[in-house]
Image (tube, helix red, strand yellow):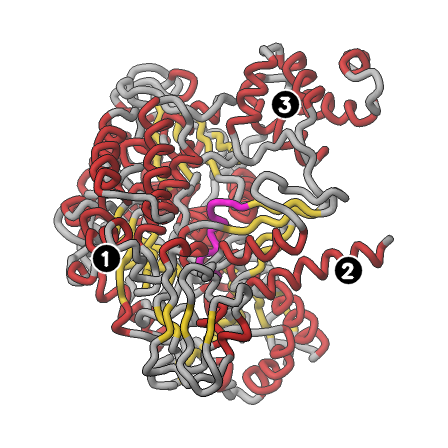
Amino acid sequence: METVERINLENVARDFQKALDVMDRRITICAGTGCVANGALKVHKALVEQLGQAGLDVKVELDVHDDAAKHDGQENVYISKSGCQGFCQMGPLVTIEPGGILYCKVKAEDVAEIIDTTLRKGETIERLLYQKPRTGERCRGRDDIPFYQRQSRTVLRECGLIDPSNINEYIAHGGYAAAERAFAQLTPEQVCNEVLESGLRGRGGGGFPTGRKWELTRVQPGPKKYVICNGDEGDPGAFMDRSVMEGNPHSVIEGMMIAARAIGADEGYIYVRMEYPLAVERMRFAIGQAEERGLLGEKLFGTQMNFKLHVMEGAGAFVCGEETALIASVEGQRGMPMPKPPFPAESGLWGKPTVINNVETLGSIPLILRPGGVAKYRAVGTEKSPGTKTFALTGHVANTGLIEVPFGTTLREIVYNIGGGVTDDFGNLMDEDFKAVQIGGPSGGCLTPEQLDLPLDFDSLRGVGAMVGSGGLVVMNSRTCMVSVARFFMQFTQNESCGKCVLCREGTKQMLALLDDIIECRADETTLELLDKLARAVQKGSLCGLGKTAPNPVLSTLKNFRQEVEAHVFDKRCPAGRCKALLMPEIDPKLCKGCTACKRKCPVGAITGEVKQVHVIDPEKCIKCGACAEACKFNAVVGV
Amino acid sequence: MEEQATVIAPHANTNKFDKVCEILARHDNRPEKLIPILQEVQAEYRYLPEQVLALIATGLGIPPASVYGVATFYAHFTLEPQGKHIVRLCDGTACHVKNSIPILEAIRERLGLSEEKKTTDDMLITVETVSCLGACGLAPVMLINDDVHGQMTPESAVELIEQILKSEKEQN
């Protein structure tokens, strides 16, 4: 490789700012996976075309050496794409600066109006502003929207702000300064110490102190070591790592460089799951840019140290999120976990000492390693879990999306203030309808209304039998059957079990069969006992985190929703009305008007009754299809 | 290498095997590159034909069983021919609690497919589920080839399927 002249970060930052200052306006379009799915790229194209036609000087890329375009009477507009801004449900999102106007659900057809009203006349378009669902009040920008107001975005701060494909903008936001400090001013030991002092704990779920992990790898002898970024975010319902890789790929690269400096590695892998094609593309592109600028490669920051980075795409195996399985996968084998010890710190990739960190952990590193970063990092969060945590807030909640809050925030704050409250199946607000939050995906557990005021951190959650996991928060309303949810996770882990440990392979299968018995009306008192016993056996008899935690959703459901489970087993009734085999449709004689609508809809002729007389369902003939309940205008059909 | 391909599959189109050899060469025939190699081969054929697996094993100098083991371990690899269009319905937690299963049932019913039968007889459409696409904010989500469609209902999902069928019919 040719040696590139050492980059002067300050000059790049200054030049970029200069180029940005020439712009009269900046329009940022969110181009995360969610907004792209809703047509963000069409909006981008329409904006570029129509602004060009309107005679404005449009830039889609900002070149730092391009400050010659200073005012020639024309308005300069910079249109950039950003990574995920987190408010996916309201996408595509368009931000217009100066003024900080945020338009939601923008369509290509709205572009002409935006140009005419907002860009020319300087007025806002009310109908495109976010509307508070309770009051109907419109919010002009991010700072007025409760979803953003109550978050403290630090790892995600640049996500959605900067152009992920522009390395200069990352540098202008202080990027790569921490890496430069780590390489040029600090010893590996000092780097490890600073990370340890910050109290940063691994964001992949386990919560192991990152500084200690690095220190353990640093002291290993030998010239060859590796850094791996675990981007195999397999937990269904979690997408924070995707957002960081898509929205701020350079922060992950910088975090990996600092890790490499700390342990003495010269090679690294970013393992991204194949379901995230955009993240793969953006990471590859960012690596290319960093190499071009001499930030990655040889003789980093004028030292004798080198760092080569590769991207590897996963092939669809949840178990590869486990570090030893991930290593096997990078080596080209089946992703099966290995017993620990030896830990990857001693013997990892190709038998060499290896540090594996999660995307979000690595994304936090540059913030910690900037001057004064440790104190700043510790200033938020709790004593034992400092800093912030990103959560993917989904399910039956008004504002779904990606959020970042300090550790110690309560569930109530997240669900009701940031999330805007619980909704029914059709998205209408139903505050009283909160039933549970599933946290930590297939390894986690459920939190109940009684735990709404629990401050969330690594230890408090472990105390109630749940875990932070990768940070998926799925809100569920009263129409959700908790047994079905437990079954859903069991099916997932059963599918994803690699098959190595007998108890995980066979145990999850049997637990799934027992849950099916409960749902399909075949369970008796022995079922619950057996389920509980089996769950504990699988926990004990599995090698890796997948098997050890696979029974958690079941145990948590048995503990927190015992009544609901027992209703299935003993009363043969599903309180949420979701389990088909347990449905018992009946017509409430007080509500029935005798309109005959249900009778006409019943496909098996199970309903009898004359006009204006109360109708009756024959339980022998009924196939529990629910057609009668759908047909009834008076909600007289109950038990469905 | 061309000769080798002919031996393994005398009746197959040798041009096709040239591609495999090209992919192997691009990765310097290194066995640790097996997963990227299989990914690229699958991108080429839309599935992993058995003869090709044998060819890869020979090319990398590893037992065919190892290649088969890896190819069957990862969900992304398929040994069955896939349809021209691949519909992936997300059944992650967020999509699941927002009722993704009725959508799957509606699509399968429209195309005459089931859990076991994933591809239509005319090899036009394959329907599968995936564990999470990471677009949970838009749940329930469906992926048609590379395009993400959010906030699906059984009706809107079937409508998208109809559009594929219609455009295919027009092309013929």
State the residue in front, A279 or A455: A455
Q: Which mark is residue B27?
A: 3
Q: In the figure, is residue A115 to the left or right of A414?
A: right
Would residue A543 appear left or right of A240 to someone viewing this image? left
The answer to which of A503 and A189 lies nearer the viewer is: A503
Q: Which span is picked out in magenta?
A: B129-139
Can residue A420 be seen here? The reply is: yes
Three-letter residue code for mark 1: Pro
Q: Indicate the secondary structure of the residue bearing disc 3.
A: loop
**Mark 3 surroundings within 10 Å by alpha-carbon count, few (fewer than 14), some (14 through 19), many (20 or more):** some
Q: What percent of the width, then of the height, locates residue A555?
A: 23, 43
Q: Which residue is mark 1?
A: A406
Residue lying at 41% horizontally and 56% vertically, measured from the top left:
A580
Please identify the residue farthest to the right as the structure is shown. B172
Query: Depth check: A85 or A424 in front?
Result: A424
Check whether the beta carbons of the residues at disc 1 and disc 2 lie within 8 A of each other.
Answer: no
Q: What is the CA distance from the residue labelled 2 to the residue labelled 3?
A: 41 Å
Q: Name the chain letter of the residue that bears numbered label 3.
A: B
Q: Are both tags, 1 and 3, on one chain?
A: no
| Quadrant (top left, top right, bottom left, bottom right) of the N terminus of chain A | top right
User: Which is more N-terminal, label 3 or label 2?
Assistant: 3
Report if residue A117 lies within the magenta region: no
Per the image, the residue denoted by label 2 is B166
Q: Residues within 10 Å of mark 2 (few under 14, many from 20)?
A: few
The answer to whether A164 is drawn above or below residue A143 in the figure is: above
